[in-house]
Every structure is written in structure tokens, then in C-alpha cells.
Image (cartoon, rainbow, N blue to C red):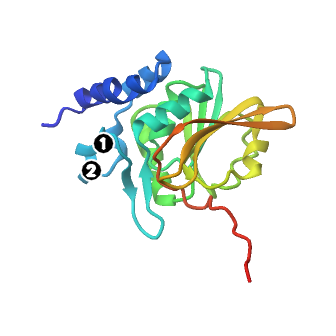
């Protein structure tokens, strides 16, 4: 029988720690959440591989980010047990589950109703009572639930909608991967007063999150 607990520890030691994931609360969270529960049964043996894992199909396929990418983005948010966090593109709920072990409250926003239902069931089974999944459009965020200390966009985007920046608290942070492979990198935004600063963090491989494509100007 496949030893998922051992694979989880090997993921931490071979993927997270060598890539500067050092905050104890982040490492602890990744050690507690069974990543294999959030991928299809047919792919569970690959749950701890250092790659994106397909979690949905159809016209707009969805993926679970490599653990290292998720971990470094979460670490960059600098959260604590009083933080309110929004996950945009919650998928099957893995990032929300990890964040629930770090932050005070976590809201996962997911526009695939079936996936949102699956995520809610998984989080309930894991008894993570400080996180909830909301079924709705991703681009607008959840202005009625904010402002947020941190926002994680769980997938690669070409552009971040201004409305998401508006939902950050003063000093709040938004982390995501910008650009399309092979020219994508993790970035961190921070809201200071009326301004939002942007800082590139590291080169990152992440599958696109549908709906965040840049609008292209019409050409004659």
C-alpha cells in the first residue's frame, strides 16, 4: 500500500525546504493536510510529485499547483491566526485546507459548482471549521466578505482585476503567478494607502486559471 504520510514528509524535505519554505507554521500546515485527498483517485499516487496535477477536465481544465509554488505564495502572504484570507479559484480545496491551519478564517471562491461541492465535503471531513467554500464567479472576488488580510489566486493569470486589490485591507497582500508558461513568475502585491506595489518573487510553473486572460485590443 502506498505510504502517503511518508510521501508527504519527503515532499516537505525535497520540495519545500530546499526552496526557502522555512516558516514553521507553513511547513506544519503542509505536513498536516493529506494532499492525496484533493486529487482524483486515479492520480493519488502522483499527489506528492513536483508537478501540477489535473483535478478537472472539460473545456477549461483545472489543476492543483505544485506544492512548492503554493507554499511559497502562502509564505509570502505573511499570515497569522487572526488573518482573514480569500482563495480565488479554490478548486477541490487544497490551498484552503492548508491556509485553514495558518489563518483565522479562510473563504474559498470557486466557480465550478461540482468542484465547490467536493471541496466543501472534503473540508468538512477534515474538520476544518474555520474555512468555507463559496460557489460564484472568480473575477469579482467577494467584496461583501472583505476586506481581506491576504488573497491567494490559485493558478496563473495574465492580469489581476482591480476589484481584487480593492478588497485588500491596508497592508494586505495578494499572491499569484502571472504570465503564461514558460514566461510565468510568482508575484506579490501589497496595498499601502491608495497604492498597490508589485514585487516579483521567483520563476514559477503554474497552469492558467481560466477567466483571467488579458483583454486584447482590436486590430484592423
**Image coords of residue 175 (percent x, y):** 61, 38
Q: Position of residue 208 (x, y in %)?
A: 51, 56
SS label for mark 1: loop
Residue drawn at 32 percent across, 30 percent down = 11
Q: Residues within 10 Å of mark 2 (few under 14, many from 20)?
A: few
Callout count: 2
- x, y (%) of residue 159? 66, 54
Give the camera-side residue of 177 and 33: 177
State left or right for residue 179 relative to residue 161: left
For the question of whether residue 129 can be seen, the reply is no
Quadrant for the N terminus in the image = top left
Secondary structure of the residue carrying numbered label 2: helix
Which part of the image, by quadrant, shows the C terminus? bottom right
For residue 4, what is the image quadrant?
top left
Q: Which residue bears the numbered disc 1?
A: 47
Residue 71 to residue 162: above or below: above
Q: Residue at point 49% right, 42% down?
A: 204
Mark 1, other Cα within 10 Å: few <14 / some 14–19 / many ≥20: many
Residue located 72% across and 46% down the image: 164
Determine whether 35 is above or below 28 in the image: below
Q: Can you tell which mark lies on residue 43?
A: 2
Amino acid at each position: 500500500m502506498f505510504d502517503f504520510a511518508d510521501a508527504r514528509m519527503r515532499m516537505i524535505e525535497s520540495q519545500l525546504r530546499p526552496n526557502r519554505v522555512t516558516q514553521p507554521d507553513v511547513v506544519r500546515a503542509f505536513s498536516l493536510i493529506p494532499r492525496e485527498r484533493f486529487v482524483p483517485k486515479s492520480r493519488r499516487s502522483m499527489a506528492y510529485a513536483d508537478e501540477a496535477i489535473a483535478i478537472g477536465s472539460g473545456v477549461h481544465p483545472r489543476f492543483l499547483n505544485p506544492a512548492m509554488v503554493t507554499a511559497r505564495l502562502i509564505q509570502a502572504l505573511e499570515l497569522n491566526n487572526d488573518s482573514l484570507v480569500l482563495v480565488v479559484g479554490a478548486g477541490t480545496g487544497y490551498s484552503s485546507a492548508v491556509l485553514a491551519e495558518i489563518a483565522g478564517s479562510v473563504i474559498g471562491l470557486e466557480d465550478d459548482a461540482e468542484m465547490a461541492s467536493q471541496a466543501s465535503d472534503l473540508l468538512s471531513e477534515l474538520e476544518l471549521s474555520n474555512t468555507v467554500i463559496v460557489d460564484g464567479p472568480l473575477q469579482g472576488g467577494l467584496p461583501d466578505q472583505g476586506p481581506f488580510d491576504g488573497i491567494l489566486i490559485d493558478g496563473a493569470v495574465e492580469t489581476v482585476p482591480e476589484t481584487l486589490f480593492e478588497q485588500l485591507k491596508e497592508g494586505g497582500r495578494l499572491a499569484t503567478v502571472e504570465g503564461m508558461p514558460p514566461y510565468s513568475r510568482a508575484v506579490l502585491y501589497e496595498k499601502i494607502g491608495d497604492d498597490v506595489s508589485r514585487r516579483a518573487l521567483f520563476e514559477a510553473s503554474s497552469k492558467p486559471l481560466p477567466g483571467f486572460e488579458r483583454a486584447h485590443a482590436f486590430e484592423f
